[in-house]
Amino acid sequence: MVIPSFIIPSGLKLSKAVLISQDPGLLIVAGSAQKRSACPCCGKRSKSVHGFYDRSLADLPVSGREVKVILRVRKLFCKNRKCSRKVFTERFVDQIKPYGRCFSRSAGLVRSVGTELGGNKGAALCKVIGYPISSSTVLRTLKGIIVSVRTLTSGTIGVDDWAFKKGRNYGTIIVDLINKEVIGLLAARKPTRLQIG
């Protein structure tokens, strides 16, 4: 059965997919149809099956109704004898994170809502659109956001002072001389307020 990508991510290979309409939403039961998966430790790909287990995943709502996916995935043997991991669970490229309880696109929705509204309001909105979660889940998702820290300066800065009116109104500009960017502009500074360090 071919499931549209607005219900299930198009890059996810499924077999024996069954759609069940139930209260309060839609249940999809399917199996993974990937031929091979890479070991998370050594990266060697394997298709030797050790066993199976079911993962319960939440996905984006459809027409305001919840979508829950029961996905049967495999446990595989690692074929690399030097690898410390002998058995590993099947990995997916980008749709499902290890230990994740939802699809990556669902987590993206929660991040966007949480960034705009916060925990309580974000959880309330998610419930209205058919994706009921707690405020703690919204905050936990926000904590997982990786923020890249930008270095403020190259290490070489220039400082220039000038007087709008001598003895009364001063201004200061701080410039990164390597990147040629203005770091700070301080207006209406008094000489007694300048503190270094």
Image: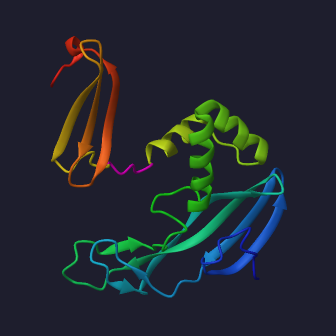
Q: Quadrant of residue 8?
A: bottom right
Magenta-highlighted residues: 145-149
Which residue is more in the foreground, 9 or 166?
166
Q: Quadrant of residue 4?
A: bottom right
Question: How far across and down, in percent of the image, does residue 183 sit?
Answer: 30, 41
Quadrant (top left, top right, bottom left, bottom right) of the C terminus: top left
Left or right of 133? Residue 78 is left
> In this figure, what is the number of numbered marks?
0
Identified at 76% across, 74% down, the residue is: 18
Q: Quadrant of residue 193?
A: top left
Which residue is more in the foreground, 161 or 40?
161
Question: How far across and down, in percent of the image, does residue 159 sit?
Answer: 20, 36
| Most common secondary structure along the magenta stretch | loop
Q: Is residue 40 above or below residue 78?
A: above
For the rendered model, the colour scheme is: rainbow
Question: How far across and down, in percent of the image, does residue 17 sit?
Answer: 72, 77
Left or right of 77? Residue 69 is right
Left or right of 125? Residue 92 is left
Identified at 58% across, 83% down, the residue is: 33
- Residue 48 in magenta stretch: no
From where the camera sits, is residue 103 visible? no
State the residue lying farthest toward the front: 165
Quadrant (top left, top right, bottom left, bottom right) of the N terminus: bottom right
Question: How far across and down, in percent of the image, does residue 140 sit?
Answer: 49, 41
Q: Is residue 73 above or below residue 1?
A: above
Identified at 75% across, 82% down, the residue is: 2
Q: Is residue 133 above or below residue 96?
A: above
